[in-house]
Image (cartoon, rainbow, N blue to C red):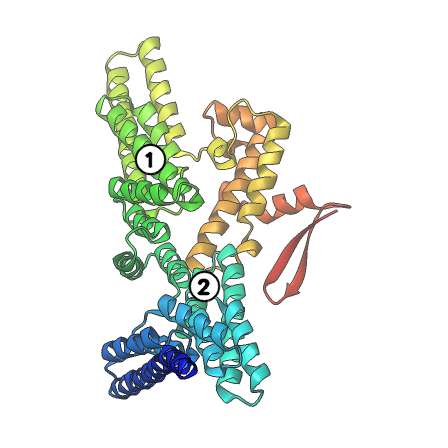
Amino acid sequence: MAAAAGCDVVMAATEPELLHDEEAKREAESFKEQGNAYYAKKDYNEAYNYYTKAIDMCPKNASYYGNRAATLMMLGRFREALGDAQQSVRLDDSFVRGHLREGKCHLSLGNAMAACRSFQRALELDHKNAQAQQEFKNANAVIEYEKIAETDFEKRDFRKVVFCMDRALEFAPACHRFKILKAECLAMLGRYPEAQSVASDILRMDSTNADALYVRGLCLYYEDCIEKAVQFFVQALRMAPDHEKACVACRNAKALKAKKEDGNKAFKEGNYKLAYELYTEALGIDPNNIKTNAKLYCNRGTVNSKYEEAVRDYEKVYQTEKTKEHKQLLKNAQLELKKSKRKDYYKILGVDKNASEDEIKKAYRKRALMHHPDRHSGASAEVQKEEEKKFKEVGEAFTILSDPKKKTRYDSGQDLDEEGMNMGDFDANNIFKAFFGGPGGFSFEASGPGNFFFQFG
């Protein structure tokens, strides 16, 4: 009797547990089937709810996580989907669809290397799997587009970067990094509405994204909304204090705003010489800011007109009373007018007026290499034209400032044409070759059509 009672006790402890497990599995399967039905009808939110119920009932079933991952992918929630896909293969490493979904999530988020590893694992389990083979090719294509874009960004070939990012985003639609790079290049190309649209889309999803804030600021900066631009740069730096691009852009924007305002103040006070110098300094801060620089050139042109007015005034005075004092005042005004219209070769080379011969040579070396046309062969026609202009000006500046006699005449405001220096016929390439040529000097070597690299002996 006691033995029978003992047996009853054992049965009472185990049967409900077994029954509960079986019921849980049956209920979980029912939830999964309902989830599948909603998935087939493309009602992904309801499918997600039922797959979640299935997981709650049986949290160690790999296929339930796999199904929910697929649903989250259809909803565009790739980061959450990645977590479910990874959990599915942790529970069952032989789950091919789990590896495929993990790889697809990695790829959609722009992590092509991780995607390759997931697809490789799927192929190890099923080497004939057509989807795994195709996705593996897609992931490698994205890796290649990234490499090309990185190289072309350094070359400032922004159109090609946009092309590469558009192709990469076909496989990685949720990659913020690719979208930001595209937006930055659109801004550099002057396509501000497109760039702003991309950045705004990201900020709607993530208001703290420092890169998107930087791009918004960049668009405003290039559209001459300097004050608003600074606000975005500052906000970006709050989110990411080490954001180098935002730091440089913020510094340039503040400097440009300050110089322009100081120039305006000097102009209003009648200090035209100082105004001219300040506008010139502002123009040297960022040659890429075309809109702001156009206004600065206009302001500087207004200053020049004031010099012309001064010359006309002194001419009238001298005609009325031809004293030595009035003659000297007229000469000074004529000299200032002439100096205001000429190029500032010190600014072009980035040296001060007391620079030594060695400092002038070093400055020329740096600027000539920076603006040499071959270095920008892959850039847009507009950029190439601008760089050719700068390259010529650097050559002009070096030719004048490296010659003591010409430098003295330039500093005193005298005509350089009297020295036989016709800048209209100036050939910057001859100066470049003379400077870098000779044994152990500079040379170009082609590495393909239109491609060159710098080589020093």
Q: Quick check: can you spot residue 187?
A: yes
Local packing at callout 2 (Cα closer than 10 Å; few below 14, some 14-19, many 20+) is: many
Residue 19: image tag: none
Mark before the other along the chain sequence, 1 or 2: 2
Q: Secondary structure at mark 2?
A: helix
- At label 1, the amino acid type is Lys
- Which residue occupies 27% across, 45% down? 224
Residue denoted by label 2 = 161
Along the horizontal axis of the image, is 317 left or right of 215? Answer: left
Q: Is residue 136 above or below residue 224?
A: below
Percent coordinates x, y for residue 441 in the rendering: 72, 45
Q: Quadrant of residue 400?
A: top right
Residue 288 image position (x, y, % from top left): 39, 47
| Left or right of 12, for residue 113 | right
In three-dimensional space, the C-alpha distance between marks 1 and 2, rounded to whole angstroms, equals 29 Å
**Residue corresponding to mark 1:** 254
Q: Is residue 308 visible?
A: no
| Image point (53%, 41%), residue name | 394
- Quadrant that contains the N terminus: bottom left
**Which residue is depicted at the point 62% across and 58% down?**
452
